[in-house]
Image (cartoon, rainbow, N blue to C red):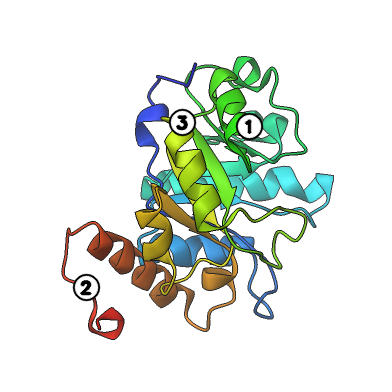
Amino acid sequence: MPAEGRLREQLRLDVYVLTSADLVVGRDHLDVARAAIAGGATMLQLRAPEVSQERLLPMARSFVALCKQAGVPGIVNDRIDVAIACDAAGVHLGQDDRPEGAREALGPDRILGASIDNPAQAREAEVLGADYLGVVVWSTGTKPAARPVGLHGLQAIARTTALPIVAIGGIDTSTAGEVLDAGASGVAVVSAVGASFDPVAATRSLVRVVAARRGRIAAPQEHRG
């Protein structure tokens, strides 16, 4: 079953930023995290496959400290051991990561996310205790091995599960509304923030578009029409 503890209550998928390094020269994972927080991101993930084992845990501790100070859930990609060691809000597991036993290892108070690409995987992830699902909608260079499901695939998955879905892959201010309409609870981005000239402004624009699509505020002028 999904977690029901204090961190489970912090699950906020509206604008979920995955960190990156060197998409802009000299900009590292923590720089992206700071910018995303300043721009109003509701959830962050440390995704650093290029970082060595020796560097990952210290980086994760700094990342989690930033997130806790801002009151934003900070998730670690793939590594349950690192997530526990740095007291992260949770972990996100890809399709190649075996989710069996993940909930038991994390305990009830940490968030467990799982990448899936079809309804059967969605049902399996729910049984294994996932709190949310990550679905690649369009092809993306930041996740080249993932199978994009398109909007129709996203709709099919959303009809299958009660778990919230965060859409990733090809998401920016021009496509965020489409995936929300198709059943996503939020949007996840890498390059839309990490590669932006102004990552704070890029995050803020995504926040405004998502909020506008849900009718909470008026749409920004540049997205009308």
Q: Position of residue 66 (x, y in %)?
A: 48, 51
Closer to the N terminus: mark 1 or mark 2?
1
Direction from residue 204 to residue 99 in the image, left or right: right
Q: Position of residue 89 (x, y in %)?
A: 50, 35
Answer few, some or many: residues within 10 Å of disc 3's Cα (few below 14, many 20 plus, some between 14 and 19): some
Quadrant in which residue 79 is drawn: top right
Quadrant in which residue 195 is drawn: bottom right
Nearer to the camera, 80 or 85: 80
Between marks 1 and 2, how big is the CA–CA gap? 35 Å
Direction from residue 113 to residue 21 in the image, left or right: right
Q: Amino acid at mark 2?
A: Ala
As helix, strand or loop, the secondary structure at mark 2 comes to loop
In the picture, the disc for residue 219 is 2
Circle 1 residue? 121
Residue drawn at 71 percent across, 68 percent down? 141
Between marks 1 and 3, how big is the CA–CA gap? 10 Å
Q: Amino acid at mark 3?
A: Thr
Residue drawn at 47 percent across, 80 percent down? 198
Quadrant in which residue 221 is drawn: bottom left
In the picture, the disc for residue 161 is 3
Closer to the N terminus: mark 1 or mark 3?
1
Residue drawn at 48 percent across, 74 percent down? 199
Query: Disc 1, disc 3: CB below 8 Å?
Result: no
As helix, strand or loop, the secondary structure at mark 1 comes to helix
- Up the image or down, 178 lies above or below 102; here it is below
